[in-house]
Image: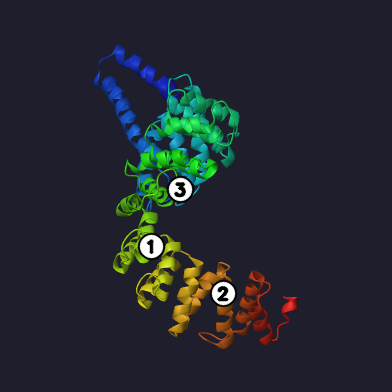
Amino acid sequence: MDEIENLPIVIAANALALLTAKRSSLVGRGLVVLRKDNDALYRQARVIFDQGDCIKNWNATDNPTNFFTFNIFKKLADENYGKAYYPLSILYSGRNDIEKGNSHAQHYTKLALEWCVANQANDDAELWCDLGDMHNFNGSDGYGITQDKEIAEFWYRKAAEQDYARAQWELGIFFIFDDQDHPGSYWMELAAKQGNADYQTILAECYEILSSQYQKAAYWFRMAAEQGDGCGQFNLGRMYEKGLGVDQNVEQFVYWTRKAAEQGYELGQWELGCMYSEGRGVAQDYVQAEYWFGKAGKQSVSGRQYELGEMYKEGRGVPQDKKQAAYWFTQAAEQGDKDGQCKLGMMCYDARNYEQAMHWYRKAAEAGHFLSQLFLAEMYEDGRGTQDDEQAVFWFRKALETSPDSGDAKGGLERLGVDWKKT
């Protein structure tokens, strides 16, 4: 049995089947059942994995779906289930909460390549597509595989000709900019026709942006929209607003934008808020505008949160409200938005909360935000919070490095007796 266990999983399974045929013991029957259970477990995890789009820089706390599939693939890999090696290697390469993730990724990539090559004769389009991925992507990541686009194309084409959607899509991406007998759009359309809404929206964007084929773009946005895809709905609404590929129709614009917003698509929510704020396509309604802006802001997109803070601060499109402004600037700042950090520092400064003002200015200043560097230097110079001429000089110099023509930074250094020309 030791020799069997060291063989590729398919060969080992065939050997186990022979053993099972020769004896009807509970142990023999149990091995076959175990194999079937592993097949089902793998398929469950693989479907989720193939649908995922957050496999880079993930962790177990923030990405429970990835953690779920990771544990399944790890369990299967520990049992020498060969098809689990490749997705496990990808999840290891993107995981940021364990040590030696890249070395584990390299280990399982090597096992995956060995297993897939050993079993390439199987009629298995998924396996062929994985081989394409390994030569297309993994070669550029330093995981022990030489990147080879010709080999990748060979395996993608072999799988694509078996009507395997992911391979058709990757093959289409290969040719998207080429004039060949089968251009990228040919293969991408074959993949999109199988119903993947992400493929449909990306294909639509390619038609719109790369070749201005607006009717085709509208068609594929509609295919995704009618499946309930928020991105497709938002973009179909946009096409109706502008009359791109369809007759201009305000009612359809509002209908599809609202559809996208109601199911949580952030761009749709923001657009609907703008529509209510401006009275564009709908009756002007600041209460509804505030509602949809708030929905979009809670999606944790820092740029939107900063913009919402500005709107509340200035009373633009929503009632002026400093508390709400501070709330949204804080949301943006805590995600590392430099503009949000600076604006929150300004509000704290105006409220004479110098300690917090310095905290937020420093956060943004350390990330290279010019105004924050300047404001932080001025606080150190004036003693608002802590007087420290050395720190003032340091941050005036940083501000001058960021913006070499800044008269304020030069003036600050001159006040402190520093020749800025020698800085």
Closer to the camera in the image, 199 or 3: 199
Residue at the location (32% across, 52% down)?
A: 251
- Tag on residue 57? none
In this rendering, the count of numbered labels is 3
In this rendering, the answer to whether 274 lies above or below 80 is below
Kindly report the distance in space between the C-alpha atoms of the residues bearing marks 1 and 3. Answer: 38 Å
The residue that mark 3 highlights is 95
Residue type marked 3:
Arg
The one nearer the camera, 144 or 303, is 303
| Residue 115 drawn at (x, y percent) | 48, 27
Local secondary structure at mark 2: helix
Distance of mark 3 from mark 2, alpha carbons? 35 Å
Quarter of the N terminus within the rendering: top left
Is any atom of residue 251 visible in this view? yes
Q: Which numbered mark, 3 or 2, is in the foreground of this view?
A: 2
Residue designated by label 2: 371
